[in-house]
Image (cartoon, grey):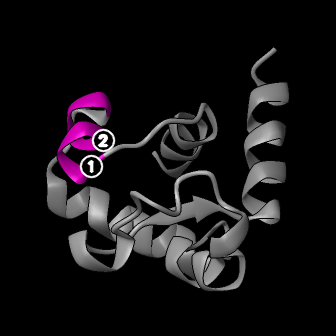
Amino acid sequence: MLDKLLRILSEGGTYSPSDLSRKLDVGEELVREMIAGLVRLGYLGSLAASCAQNCGRCAQSTVCSVSVRGQAWTLTEDGKRAARRIHDSRR
């Protein structure tokens, strides 16, 4: 199930836990646990940490409200590599 979540996230876009729970056909609590697992594996990193370092260069900096709306995550380089491996193994 983690590989399916990782594949969805690697396709790009922005998803809420409810969006992901519908796509995966599981409850939101399980989605939150899966996200926490991907963070522990180093496949997801906090977007806020990235924003703090790169905010001035971001095209969305004038409308970004990551710290107000809640936690946001992005795939790390390890996460992108893992998603590519999953994609390649399904060919």
Q: Is residue 60 left or right of residue 35?
A: right
Amino acid, disc 1:
Ser
Q: Pinpoint residue 38: horizontal percent, then vertical percent.
A: 55, 68
Q: Is residue 27 left or right of residue 39?
A: left
Q: Based on the picture, tell me whether residue 43 belongs to the magenta stretch.
A: no
Label 1 neighbourhood size at 10 Å, few (<14), some (14-19), many (20+)? few
Residue reaching furthest to the top: 91
- Nearer to us in this view, 14 or 32: 14
Disc 2 designates what residue?
Answer: 20
Q: Pinpoint residue 7: horizontal percent, then vertical percent.
A: 60, 37
Q: Residue at x 66, y 66 (%)?
A: 43
Q: Residue at x 46, y 61 (%)?
A: 62
SS at circle 2 = helix
Q: Pinpoint residue 6: horizontal percent, then vertical percent.
A: 57, 46
Quadrant where the C terminus sits is: top right
Query: Chief secondary structure of the magenta span?
Result: helix
- 62, above or below 89, in the image: below
Which mark is on residue 52?
Answer: none
Closer mark to the observer between disc 2 and disc 1: 1
State which region is magenta. 16-23
Q: Is residue 20 left or right of residue 87?
A: left
- Res 57 quadrant in image: bottom right
